[in-house]
């Protein structure tokens, strides 16, 4: 392939050969082809107020709604759109989460007045269902009060956040049109990459359409009246436990640490089971929602603790050049790490900065056996490489870099080209 300079329009055929890169400026996808005629609501709107609409709609009208909503949703990630929901709100123009249709915090003084929160969707709840209402629905893993819920609100201030019991469910809810976006934590400034989520990005065909970086401010929560000395156990998400490791030791707690699915779920567990020997690490919002006291505030090991989340959608957004964009790719080669230098130089020669590089085991070919005749047999581990770089796929230099990368690799996928989160840095801000 020649390394000529390409414009976006002249490079369509090149970009089409890069798996999953969008080359159209609009899509005519409608839900009509995606829904079985027999789709039935299976969610109780009282139990799942945020999950989906409140009544069963007839097929014809739901197709019409979906068709118009798919156009509307496309424009919501498009920075050129005038919608207040679009991703530019992530980038410092509106970084509050006030407008998120979060579960309201009632005046909870103790755990006996605990109000039932919406139950997360589970894998058995998933069924294609028509959409209603105009709010963007954003699926996240966890229960109300989780940081992922706050990230959804930062990215899409007017969204309905849909709790899901697993990441897999959040992905599937977007694939099945139950939700419009999924929010996925990918890395933390203290804990590093969330590896499993990188694997999920590859297993599914969703596109990254935005990112948010959320300051994560952890609290130690316990039932009212419980003192630190009574505690024998601290539970939380493994990332949260890792982010507070040293502070927990410094607090002099004589506790075991146990991992659960999410931070707010840990708080809910303590409250529901009336556990007086157990504390949870979670947000201040989780304390309010589940009627817990804050025993210690800001217990993350670094005050500038930040988690980066990506927003996923069924359709990619159209990359632009009038604002800072980031592009995420994943690639592999049979010759493994030996091509890495060549790939990275494709970016270096074009002055494209990399913001992230991550390697993961190549699950379908984890080992390459190299027969060294007399010397025996060497077993090399095979990897997939995830790279984020600071350029938009609308820029010829990024297109040319990827054309070159494609020559060196046996597999290449563009996971998304999306606006960078440019929120001003304020490490001490508390954001729950
Ligand atoms: O448990 C939560 O509240 C989450 O949103 C998950 C999660 C993560 O997976 O890293 C998100 C942010 C924090 O870093 C801790 C936990």
Image (cartoon, rainbow, N blue to C red):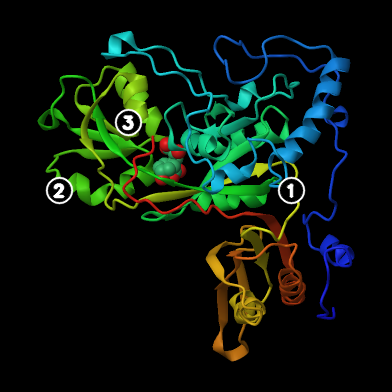
Where the C terminus falls, by quadrant? top left
Where the N terminus falls, by quadrant? bottom right
Judged from the image, the secondary structure of the residue bearing numbered disc 2 is: helix
Where is residue 243? Give x, y as percent. 32, 49
Question: What is the C-alpha distance between the residues marked 3 and 2?
Answer: 21 Å
Judged from the image, the secondary structure of the residue bearing numbered disc 3 is: helix
| 147 or 253, nearer to the observer | 147
| 368 or 112, nearer to the observer | 112
Q: How many marks?
A: 3
Q: Residues within 10 Å of mark 1 (few under 14, many from 20)?
A: many
* Residue found 76% across the figure and 52% down from its top: 318
Label placed on residue 284: 3
Judge: label 2 CB < 8 Å from ligand 1: no
Residue behind mark 2: 250
Residue behind mark 1: 316
Where is residue 385? Give x, y as percent. 60, 66
Q: Residue furthest bottom?
A: 374
User: Taking the image as drawn, is residue 401 in sight?
Assistant: yes
* Residue found 55% across the figure and 29% down from its top: 164
Q: Earlier in the sequence, mark 3 or mark 2?
A: 2
Q: Is residue 164 above or below residue 378?
A: above
| 286 or 166, nearer to the observer | 286
In the image, taking residue 410 as reference, residue 122 lies left or right, namely: left
* Residue found 57% across the figure and 16% down from its top: 48
* Residue found 33% across the figure and 42% down from its top: 217
Q: Is residue 416 above or below residue 94?
A: below
| 164 or 368, nearer to the observer | 164
Q: Residues within 10 Å of mark 2 (few under 14, many from 20)?
A: few
Judge: label 1 CB < 8 Å from ligand 1: no
Q: Mark 3 against mark 2, which lies toward the viewer?
A: 3
Ligand 1 - quadrant of the structure image: top left
Question: What is the C-alpha distance between the residues marked 2 and 1?
Answer: 46 Å
């Amino acid at each position: 392939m020649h390394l000529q300079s390409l414009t976006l329009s002249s490079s369509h055929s090149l970009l089409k050969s890069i798996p999953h890169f969008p080359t159209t400026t609009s899509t005519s996808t409608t839900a009509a082809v995606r829904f079985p005629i027999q789709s039935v609501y299976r969610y109780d709107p009282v139990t799942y107020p945020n999950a989906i609409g409140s009544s069963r709609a007839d097929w014809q009208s739901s197709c019409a709604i979906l068709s118009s909503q798919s156009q509307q949703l496309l424009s919501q990630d498009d920075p050129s759109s005038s919608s207040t929901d679009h991703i530019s709100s992530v980038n410092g123009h509106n970084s509050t989460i006030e407008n998120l249709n979060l579960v309201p915090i009632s005046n909870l003084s103790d755990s006996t007045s605990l109000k039932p929160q919406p139950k997360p969707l589970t894998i058995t709840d998933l069924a294609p269902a028509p959409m209603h209402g105009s709010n963007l629905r954003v699926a996240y893993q966890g229960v109300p009060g989780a940081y992922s819920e706050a990230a959804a609100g930062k990215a899409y201030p007017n969204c309905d956040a849909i709790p899901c019991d697993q990441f897999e469910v959040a992905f599937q809810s977007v694939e099945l049109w139950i939700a419009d976006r999924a929010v996925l934590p990918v890395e933390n400034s203290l804990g590093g990459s969330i590896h499993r989520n990188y694997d999920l990005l590859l297993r599914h065909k969703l596109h990254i359409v935005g990112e948010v970086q959320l300051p994560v401010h952890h609290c130690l929560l316990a039932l009212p009246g419980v003192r630190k000395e009574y505690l024998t156990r601290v539970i939380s998400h493994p990332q949260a436990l890792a982010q507070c490791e040293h502070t927990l030791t410094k607090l002099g707690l004589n506790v075991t640490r146990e991992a659960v699915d999410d931070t707010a779920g840990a708080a809910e567990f303590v409250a529901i089971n009336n556990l007086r020997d157990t504390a949870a690490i979670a947000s201040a919002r989780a304390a309010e929602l589940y009627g817990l006291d804050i025993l210690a505030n800001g217990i993350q090991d670094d005050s500038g603790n930040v988690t980066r989340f990506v927003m996923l959608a069924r359709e990619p957004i159209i990359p632009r050049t009038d604002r800072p964009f980031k592009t995420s790719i994943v690639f592999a080669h049979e010759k493994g790490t030996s091509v890495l230098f060549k790939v990275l130089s494709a970016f270096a020669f074009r002055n494209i900065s990399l913001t992230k590089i991550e390697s993961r085991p190549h699950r379908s070919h984890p080992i390459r056996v190299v027969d060294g005749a007399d010397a025996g047999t060497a077993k090399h581990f095979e990897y997939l490489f995830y790279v984020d770089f600071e350029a938009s796929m609308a820029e010829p230099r990024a297109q040319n870099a990827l054309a070159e990368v494609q020559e060196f690799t046996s597999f290449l996928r563009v996971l998304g080209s999306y606006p960078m989160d440019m929120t001003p840095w304020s490490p001490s801000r508390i954001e729950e």
